[in-house]
Amino acid sequence: MSGKLSMIRHAVRMLAIMYCVCGQPAYSNYEAQAVTPPLSFSQFCIQYPEDCQRHNDRRNRDFRSSAQRWRELTQINSIVNFGIAPKDPSASGRDAEWQIFPYDGNCGDYAVTKRHLLLRSGWPSSALLLAEVAIRATGEHHLGADRA
């Protein structure tokens, strides 16, 4: 009986957390604005112009099932996560410079390396959008995948 009660309490806590997170929208300014890309993106595109071009889906949709695509995605994610040693952006001295497969790197290096490998695997660039966010309280920037 105590096991079931513990599971119910855990489920209620998780629902409460989901309500708090999902019920409060992130800060957003709804006014239309011209947005310039981060300087890091511009520098990256100069160094890796092929990765900044539009790529259409080159995957054979009939051949690859959703499960196969998911395996490909998780495999590339693991390869990059284990292949790049994590480094704090403030300690790296090059936190504004994204690189593909550096020895050590920050979130930007991880994100562009994963995107690079997925592009080379035939994924469309429209499915591999990146988003940079700034945490208001700390001013810290983070780059990650964005869902189209």
Image (cartoon, helix red, strand yellow):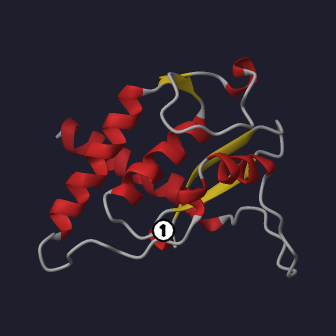
Please tell me whether mark 1 sits on a helix, a strand or a loop: helix
Where 16 sits versus 28, above or below?
above
Q: Is residue 110 left or right of residue 5?
A: right
Which residue does the image show at 35% across and 51% down from the upper left? 11
Amino acid carrying label 1: it is: Ser
Which residue does the image show at 36% across and 27% down from the upper left? 82
In the image, 71 versus 121, the foreground residue is: 121
Residue located beneath label 1 in the image: 125
Image-quadrant location for residue 120:
bottom left
Question: Where is residue 9 drawn, in percent x and y?
Answer: 37, 45
Q: In this view, does 108 lie to the left or right of 9?
A: right
Which residue does the image show at 21% across and 44% down from the upper left? 4
Question: Where is residue 75 drawn, in percent x and y?
Answer: 26, 44
Image-quadrant location for residue 135:
top right
Q: Quadrant of the N terminus?
A: top left
Which residue does the image show at 70% across and 37% down from the upper left? 97
Image-quadrant location for residue 49:
bottom right
